[in-house]
Image (cartoon, rainbow, N blue to C red):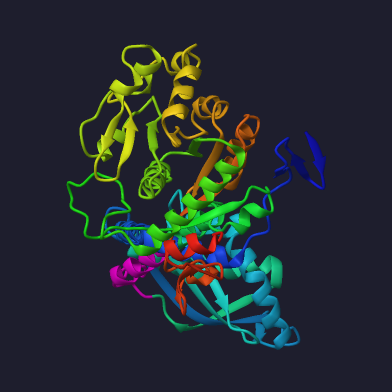
Amino acid sequence: MAEKNGYQKADSGSYRKLDGDDVIDLGTLFWNIIQGFLKFWWLVILLMAIGAGAFYLKASRIFYMPMYQSSATFTVLTGGASTADSGNGTYNFYYDTTTAGQLARTFPYILSSSLLTDAIKEDLGVEAVNGSISAQAISESNMITMSVISQSPEDAKAILESAIKVYPDIARFVIGDTRFNIIDEPTMPDGPYNKPSYRAQIKKGGLYGAGAGILLICLYAFFKKTVQKPEELKSAMSLTCIANIPEAPRKLRKQKDQRWIRMKDDRTPQAFKENIQSLQIRISRELEERGGKLLLITSTMPEEGKSTLAYNLAAAAASHGVKVLFVDADLRKQEDRKHLTGEIGRGLASVVTGKCTLEEAVRNEEETGIDFLGGSRPIKKVQQILNHSRFEAVLQEMKERWDLIILDAPPAEMFEDASILAERADGILYIIRYDMVQKRRILDCIQGLEDAKAPLLGYAFNGIPVHRGGYGYYGYGRYGYGYYGYSSYSYEDRKKRGAHD
């Protein structure tokens, strides 16, 4: 395969990007954040509750340790021998701004020194000081507030009194002789200074939890990387988007109704029906130009709406007189039968292995006119069935009896079944569901299918929300329901005009 400008060209002519992901689309990122909040709002509430509970426990008696604080305020004077002439050996104590600055700088060092700690232990007659000492100097003054914090109110007061007593002797070696002029005497604490405010702690924990939840949602939106616009794939491959299928929720759906959304159901949105009809015209034209009848439909992973679209494409073709055979080719599951009405016959594996004839296995759904071939139990040895010597003959018999054969194949990412079936198909329709699969995974699967003999006719972008008007997908306009600037006329009008979707 050739490489050009950072892309890898396959034999089919499509390109796959080799370098990193595209530049982040801020609009898509903002939309993902909104969707993240709508999807994970409960996570924010849960983390708020957890945060509030954690902070409450932290403030409660389980983890809370009461601490007591004793404080005293005093001024500090320094002195020198000023009465030497009188011979009495006394000192004059004074204060100036230079001394104030020196006090502010040296006080923390003296308080944390081992000399002061040892002096306090000796004065109190204890082996350890049960508290921590701190001091705060008022700027440009000699006023000091000294505090002691301890688990015991008595120890807090005693340590503070001792510190005030022994400090001048320790400070003499640094700033000379000092004297304290007490303004506020040390007091006995009447209660813990760190008494918690439960309401404030709960509020704080709730805010932290909410912040964590919001951060997780933003990270989820940033790393999501799912395809939300066909334009995201245009830069990585040349495979054409041949249909944009709107989301078709059925709010009136009965709880026990397990069948697919159907074209003939009155509750199915008209936009869904019209776009299926348009896709069916496009696919029929592509197969006719190639002289083929066998269409394989696959996707990257389950739950992308592949089987629903396959069934409705068959119904759309059958409604216009096309003789259609709808085949459940996902032999590992074989669950399509659950969604159809009428009697269910035997599956593809039974026909290939000769347990019954094609005519005996196929059943007709009267509601749509579709002929259906599908089993009721998963097949274990799928590879043996797909590579069976009679498999090609069975497909050839199908082409002789039906105008259109739709193979509902398994997802391409999980097994090689889709690639094996693609070798025998006349065309491949790939289904990509909005906001479900990362681009790299889609490209890997498509790259694998490009090696098959059957051409990739294009992909259908499925499940686009009708309300996503910000990107111009769907909206009601003057000429009806349209997308990407194209207004959908009725099916008969398009058929007469020969219009492309």
Q: In the image, 170: left or right of 70?
A: right
Q: Position of residue 230 (x, y in %)?
A: 58, 56
On screen, 22 above or below 29?
above
Locate the N terminus and report the quarter of the image it occupies. Answer: top right
> Is residue 66 left or right of 168 when viewed as pictured?
left
Q: Nearer the viewer, residue 397 or 200?
A: 397
Report the span colored magenta: 187-210
Residue 203 counted in the magenta span: yes
* Residue drawn at point x = 79 percent, y = 46 percent: 6
Above or below, 71 relative to 43:
below
The image position of residue 350, as x and y in percent, is 34, 17
Q: Please tell me in which quadrant of the rendered image residue 367 appears.
A: top left
- In the rendered view, tell whether residue 183 sits above or below residue 275: below
The image quadrant that residue 252 belongs to is: bottom left
429 drawn magenta: no
- The location of residue 311, given as percent across then percent down, is 37, 43
Residue 40, position in %: x, y?
38, 58
Look at the image and tell me whether residue 434 can be seen: no
Q: Is residue 281 visible?
A: yes
- Whether residue 442 sits left or right of residue 462 in the image: it is right
The residue lying at 42 percent from left, 39 percent from top is 302
Given residues 34 and 459, the one toward you in this image is: 459
In the foreground, 489 or 474? 489
